[in-house]
Image (cartoon, helix red, strand yellow):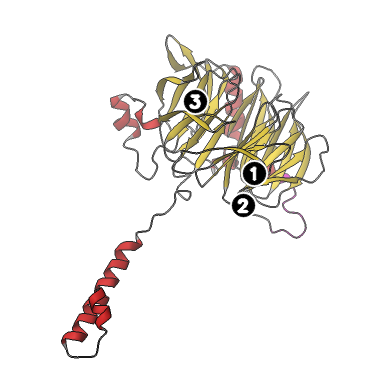
Amino acid sequence: MLHLRCGLLAVAGGSRLVAGRIRSDEPFFVFDFGSLERRPPGQDPSDQEKILAAAFSSSGEYFALTDENKRLVLFKTSPSWEKISVRWLSRRCTALAFSPCDSRVLVADKSGDVFSFSVKAAQEDGRLELGHLSMLLDLVAALDGRHIITCDRDEKIRVSLWGAPHVITAFCLGHTEFVSQLVLPAGREKLLLSGSGDGTLRLWRYETGQELQNCRISSIPRPENDQEDKVGPIPPSLGFAVFRIRCCPRGEKVAVLCDGVHGIYLLSISDSPRLFQPLYVALPYVPVDVDFEDSTSLWVFSAIKENPIELLQYREQRWQPVPRDDRMKELSEVIRGSWEQMEGSVVLENRFSALYKAVFDNMASYLQKKEARIQTEKRKFSNGQEGSTAKIQKA
């Protein structure tokens, strides 16, 4: 996972966190989750040390992580990185988000519940905010502090009141597969972006549930030589499943990653509002994660040990990698030093295969059994055996 906020950068994977300021001479902060207590009383530990979700607060002053061992770890980033609390969760987390005022951390879990934890009271237990009947995959807190927006495996996006989460103000309905990502573009009031396993990126006015635009990722043109030489045909089971959406700090640019695709899809958001100027940036590898530093600078995290981090900038009317400066070289060296702990968490494709719903055709089996039953009844009647005239007439 790669996260940027207010000049800070964090790379998390496996059991390691590498973080620091992008433009600074300070050494990078490295934290190993293996050094933490593995279980609270009464709970069994996980055999894996794997970070599941992470998020910066809106001010960049705090950073939170959760892992396979059901721990919520909170860090303070200023004046230097420091762990301030470790709290236990009842279930494994699927998504994290901070409240707009940085006072609480929202944690969504696989059972469909959302708990919130205090940032200031670092040892305080979490409180239940709301629940779904399906697995939660992502959540965001509206910038006005009035709404919590959640999405789940059952194609739903739900908008709930923060002060009274049992009050659902709207549903954003239209996706035909699980909804994997939610993003609130900065500076675009009441707008929501969502990505799904159905291969679409949708723009909503979330307060009313109105769908403003539906962009199918497969319709964005790619270079002909790139499609076969680098990417190859996308397996039908993947269907351009969206696994990451990032917006730049001012909200006018959007970067989208799809499962197993060797490149980045970039779009712009107009004041209309509309998604326009779709662009595909081909890469020689499958990106693990991306995030914007600003509207013309995009950081990319890859699964390549020799070059784990890369910076793309918009120059001369196209996105292109820039030469690595001393700070990028230092960051790459620190990541390589933690590669054994990070490598196992890098999943390049089929990360959503278990979320697609299986379709069963029971009708064919039913009709076959019905026909066999009818033929049996006919044979009994033709052989002079006592049969049900009513059943034959019905057949």
Task: Give the left or right position of residue 61, taking residue 208 as reference.
Answer: right
Q: State which mark lies toward you, 3 or 2.
A: 2
- Determine whether label 3 and label 1 are within 8 Å by CB: no
Front residue (pair 37, 212): 212
**For the residue marked with disc 1, what is the amino acid?**
Ala
Q: Specify the farthest residue to the left.
A: 382
Mark 1, other Cα within 10 Å: few <14 / some 14–19 / many ≥20: many
Which disc is residue 255 wearing? 3
Magenta stretch, main secondary structure, is loop
Residue labelled with disc 1: 108
Mark 3, other Cα within 10 Å: few <14 / some 14–19 / many ≥20: many
Task: Give the left or right position of residue 224, taking residue 163 as reference.
Answer: left
Front residue (pair 321, 249): 249
Residue, x 55% and y 24% (percent of image)? Answer: 247
**For the residue marked with disc 3, what is the amino acid?**
Ala
Which disc is residue 174 wearing? none
Image quarter of residue 385? bottom left
Is 98 colored magenta in this rendering?
Answer: no
Look at the numbered disc 1 and give the secondary structure of its residue.
strand
- Image quarter in which the C terminus is found: bottom left
Q: CA distance from mark 1 to mark 2?
A: 8 Å
Q: CA distance from mark 3 to mark 1?
A: 24 Å
Q: Position of residue 279 (x, y in %)?
A: 40, 21
Closer to the chain start, of discs 3 and 1, is 1
316 above or below 139? Answer: above
66 above or below 203? Answer: below
Residue, x 53% and y 21% (percent of image)? Answer: 298
**For the residue marked with disc 2, what is the amino acid?**
Ser
Is 38 colored magenta in this rendering?
Answer: yes
Q: What stretch of residues is rendered in magenta?
A: 34-44
Q: CA distance from mark 3 to mark 2?
A: 29 Å
Which disc is residue 111 wearing? 2
